[in-house]
Structure formats: C-alpha cells, structure tokens
Image (spheres, rainbow, N blue to C red):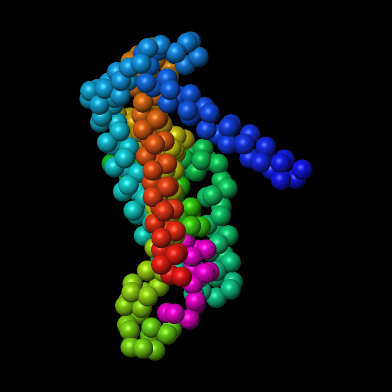
C-alpha cells in the first residue's frame, strides 16, 4: 500500500507540474486566441510570428544575452567562492555558507528594491548603463551556483590540492588542472541554473532595468495587460520552445553523466 500511495502521489505531482505546460504547448500549435476558449485549427502561425516580429526577436536576444553573461560572471565568482570556503577554517566556512543562504531564502522583491536603492538612488548609477540590472542578476544567481558546486567539493578528496603541490605543481596549476576539473558537473549544473533563474526573474529586473529594455518575464507581464492578441499567442510558442530546450539540455546532461559514471567503473 505504501508503494501504491507513493506512485499515486508522484503521479499527482507530475500531472500538476506538466499538464499546464502541455496544454499551453497544444494551444501554441492552434489558431486559438485564448487558452480555454476551445482549441482551434492546427497552425504554425504563432511560431512564425515569434520570429517575424522584430520587437519579439530583440527582446529574446537581449534576454538570452543578459542571462548568459550574468550566468558566466556568477559561475566564476561562485566557483572561486566555493573553493575558498571549502579550504577555509570551520568558522570562516560557516560564515560564508550562512551569508550565501541569505540571498537564496530572501524574497526577490526585497533584493530588487535593495539593489535599486543602493545603486540607483544612493550611488546614482544610471539604469541605462545596465550595471544595476547586471549586478542584480548576479546577486540573484551566484548563491545558487555556489550551492551546486559545494556538494562536488565535499565528494572530492580534500587532499588532492596538497598532493598536487607536493608533486611540484604551482598553486594555479593545482587549482586549474586538479581541483576545478573535479567540479565540472557542478559548475555546468550551476551555470544552467543561473541561466534559468535569470531568464525567469521579474522583480529584480523590474526595479533595475532600463526603461527601454524588456526581458521575457517583464515583456510577458506587460503583454498580458494589453490587447495585442498576436503577441500573446506568439508568447505561447516562446514558452513551449523554452520548455523543450530545457528538457533537451537536462536529458543530455543526464545521459553524459551516466556515460561518464559507467566509464569510471
């Protein structure tokens, strides 16, 4: 009975998670103008409009560029921060871990408003420079990358670094040729998580972005308030494509991880 209950519960969770996405995907291939108003005829118009609309193309490109740049910065900072924490004394490590958890559990709206006050109001950095927006996304994503890397460090033999130094490697060689290669799976997972968080963020972006710039999240919210049906339905197609890309990346990462694990055996 426990096993049956577990399977039923798992099925309910998966259904609640994926059925809404699948419904949206179905409507993205129709000519319907509203979800729930009846499925119309089959059509690729939503996908064609997504790439024909210059405003949508610019918005998507800007969002993706912002996500990858901020994810790269976050990954570098979090990787060296995690390594430094791992090799620090117990008290220092505890303080760093605690400080890292605060942005994770803190509400996005608090983080966004705080960054806005500090950078834009107090330091008077213009939003048009994209500096507040970039810093906001790095503050949002770096702690999650840190949390992705720490488990890999704990799985690693802590004496590898010292062993490399004893064998004649310089500190830089020991770091980049011995330690960091052990962390690649965690670094890649953290990077992809950072990209996803940046793409999805709304509150921090709203408080820090230039007035003429929109990410997918802010654009979607503004579009749903308007009456541009063609734009709304094109966003169904965009949501479906993002979901498919994420699924493909996750599957590929799992396949490569399994192959690597089997090769190690």
Q: Is residue 151 magenta?
A: yes
Quadrant of the rendered image containing residue 95: bottom right
* Left or right of residue 110: residue 30: left
Q: Position of residue 140 (x, y in %)?
A: 46, 47
Q: Is residue 80 above or below residue 62?
A: below
Q: Is residue 61 above or below residue 52?
A: below
Q: Is residue 114 magenta?
A: no
Q: Is residue 92 above or below residue 226?
A: below
Name the residue: 26% across, 29% down. 57
Name the residue: 42% across, 47% down. 251
Name the residue: 56% across, 52% down. 102
Q: Main secondary structure of the magenta part?
A: helix
Q: Position of residue 66 (x, y in %)?
A: 32, 42
Q: Position of residue 101 (x, y in %)?
A: 56, 55
Part of the protein shown in magenta? 149-161
Q: Is residue 193 visible?
A: yes
């Amino acid at each position: 009975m426990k096993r049956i209950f577990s399977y039923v519960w798992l099925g309910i969770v998966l259904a609640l998670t994926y059925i809404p996405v699948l419904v949206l995907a179905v409507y993205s291939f129709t000519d319907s103008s509203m979800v729930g108003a009846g499925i119309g005829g089959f059509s690729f118009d939503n996908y064609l409009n997504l790439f024909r609309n210059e405003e949508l193309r610019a918005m998507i490109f800007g969002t993706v560029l912002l996500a990858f740049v901020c994810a790269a910065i976050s990954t570098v900072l979090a990787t060296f921060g995690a390594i430094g924490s791992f090799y620090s004394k117990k008290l220092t490590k505890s303080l760093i871990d605690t400080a890292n958890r605060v942005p994770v559990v803190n509400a996005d709206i608090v983080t966004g408003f705080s960054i806005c006050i500090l950078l834009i109001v107090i330091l008077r950095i213009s939003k048009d420079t994209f500096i507040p927006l970039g810093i906001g996304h790095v503050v949002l994503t770096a702690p999650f990358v840190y949390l992705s890397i720490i488990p890999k460090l704990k799985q690693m033999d802590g004496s590898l670094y010292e062993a490399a130094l004893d064998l004649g490697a310089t500190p830089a060689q020991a770091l980049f040729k011995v330690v960091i290669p052990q962390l690649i799976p965690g670094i890649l997972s953290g990077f992809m998580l950072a990209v996803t968080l940046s793409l999805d963020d709304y509150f921090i972006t709203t408080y820090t972005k230039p007035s003429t710039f929109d990410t997918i999240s802010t654009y979607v919210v503004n579009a749903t308030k308007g009456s541009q049906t063609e734009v709304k339905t094109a966003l169904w197609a965009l949501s479906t494509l993002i979901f498919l890309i994420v699924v493909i990346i996750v599957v590929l990462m799992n396949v490569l991880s399994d192959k690597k694990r089997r090769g190690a055996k």
